[in-house]
Image (spheres, rainbow, N blue to C red):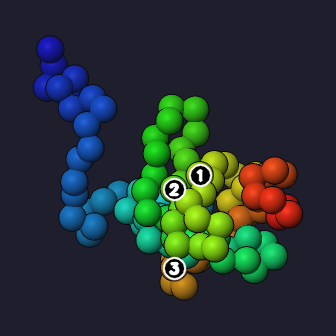
């Protein structure tokens, strides 16, 4: 087993100042956790408390909004804007994810 193979699938921690810069629109997981999530209609949906790594696409676990716990797919078609300065995310909810919301 090579030294790199031992690390496959592991989470590595680096000080923020040593991390490589990511391309525009890409974020490290810890930069997403804690964001306040709003629909494009300005409805507060919750705060991202966890990111589920499903293999197909990541899923954000939101808590704290009036709809309770929400599992939000982390897809470009859903996530419209991430503002790290304001610590917010704007999303266009898929039809049927919440009653009465699009």
Q: Nearer the viewer, mark 3 or mark 2?
A: 2
Q: Mark 3 or mark 2, which has the lower sequence index?
A: 2
> Quick one: label 3, few (<14), some, or many (20+) residues within 10 Å?
some
The residue beneath circle 3 is 87
- Of residues 25 and 53, which is closer to you in this image? 53
Asked which secondary structure carries label 1, the reply is strand
Residue 79: x and y in percent read 68, 60
Which quadrant holds residue 11?
top left
Q: Is residue 89 visible?
A: no
Contact between marks 1 and 3 (CB within 8 A): the answer is no
Closer to the chain start, of discs 2 and 1, is 2
Can I make out residue 15 in this image? yes
Frontmost residue, 45 versus 54: 45
Q: Secondary structure at mark 3?
A: loop
Element under disc 2: strand
Q: Please provide percent x and percent y for residue 22.
A: 46, 58
**Is label 2 in contact with label 1 (beta carbons under 8 Å)?**
yes
- The quadrant in which residue 50 appears is bottom left
């Amino acid at each position: 087993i090579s030294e790199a193979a031992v690390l496959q699938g592991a989470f590595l921690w680096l000080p923020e100042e040593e991390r490589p810069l990511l391309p525009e629109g890409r974020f490290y997981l810890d930069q997403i956790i804690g964001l306040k999530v709003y629909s494009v209609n300005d409805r507060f949906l919750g705060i991202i408390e966890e990111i589920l790594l499903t293999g197909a696409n990541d899923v954000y676990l939101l808590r704290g909004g009036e709809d309770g716990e929400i599992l939000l797919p982390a897809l470009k078609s859903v996530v419209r804007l991430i503002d790290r300065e304001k610590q917010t995310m704007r999303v266009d909810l898929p039809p049927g994810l919440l009653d009465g919301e699009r």
